[in-house]
Image (spheres, rainbow, N blue to C red):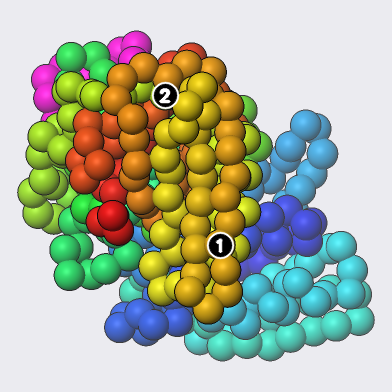
Amino acid sequence: MKFEIMRQHLLDGLNDVMKAVSSKTTIPILTGIKLEVTEVGLRLTGSDSDITIQTFIKAEENGDQVIRVIEEGSIVVQARMFNEIIRKLPTSDVEIEVKENCHTYIRSGKSEFHIIGQEPSEYPLLPEIQDDRQFIIPADLLKSIVRETVFAVSSSESRPVLTGVHWQVKNGELVCVATDSHRLARRKVTLEQLPEGEYSVVIPGKSLNDLSKIIGDSSHPVHIAMTSQQVLFKTANVLFYSRLLEGNYPDTSRLIPTEYKTTVTMNGKALFHAIDRASLLAREERNNIVRLSSLEGNIVEISSSSPEIGEVEEEIQSTTFVGEEIKISFSAKYMMDALRALDGQDVTIQLAGAMRPFIINSIHDDAVLQLIVPVRTY
């Protein structure tokens, strides 16, 4: 195998596949990256057996030659070392040559590295995924879904299924739900050409975060194909495979109240900043609790206190206030995460009682729903 490549294109590809490489893997060859070069381009693959990322660098792009292929072939190289070497090479051109027994030479300018690679035939094959359960989603919409849900997954491994986001397709709608049992985030999307029937998968939160970074500012649509154990996201030059979480996701629809005693609408940014300020004192306490209570004249008071430090109170004028007076306590972090997901829009808060879960929506759109379980302090 022998080829020359523009260093920046190689670095961009490495940047994607390195997200899938883990130093903690029990399969030694997965600490490496597989390189396969043909006359059409270079394919890079990285995997930790939970996620696999494959990216393709075309030999020609917009009429410019990116790769000059002298001899086709493949090799597995130690990922972190290879990445560091390429990053620190002195010039913008790189030559990579593999000789007998996987001896790999990397040349750039007056610099030459010699590293020992591994047999590419030992690298695991990519999962087989049929296209029968496939649909397309715009890249920016997929990033929004991740941003609006994934923060609410559980960080505890005691219930592994809650560390993922539940994606359910039914009635021409995609419903994505994340919960850690103290809060819940849900996004509904109506998509054209969804596959027939109902099915659901649980995608690890970490996989979705990595996927979102890889998509970046891409404007290409993302093709999504699902099986019972894997999901594949296909973009222009990247294949992103993730294993799915096993187990039954809880029926979260029962958690969402259907009747409310109080409905408040207010400026989302003002509420966010008031809670942020109140949490300065609340953070000193172990549980970071902030209180929200109603005053006369549609005014809402945000407050918190710490016995050792002091207390803070701030009043916000709500736009509308309908129903019973309220006095409720909640985690400042959970509330700020929920408001951040609503992206500073004006919000509606619906409450069913001091100790019942409450709902936060954008006043413009109920496609995104945030639910928080209050904390007993009164």
Q: Nearer the viewer, residue 237 or 40?
A: 237
- The amino acid marked with disc number 1 is Glu
Q: Identify residue for label 2.
A: 264
Query: What percent of the width, then of the height, locates residue 251?
Result: 10, 39
Say if 28 sits above or below 257 in the image: below
Which numbered disc, 2 or 1, marks the residue that appears first in the sequence?
2
Residue 81 is tagged as none
Q: Which residues are magenta?
A: 188-199
Is residue 206 visible from the viewing direction of this image? Answer: yes
Of badges 2 and 1, nearer the viewer stands 1
Q: Few, some or many C-alpha atoms within 10 Å of disc 2 (few <14, some 14-19, many ≥20)?
A: many
Considering every residue shown, the one lying at the far front of the view is: 296
Is residue 151 visible from the viewing direction of this image? Answer: no
Query: What percent of the width, then of the height, locates residue 322?
Result: 36, 17
Q: CA distance from mark 2 to mark 1?
A: 25 Å
Residue 311 is tagged as 1
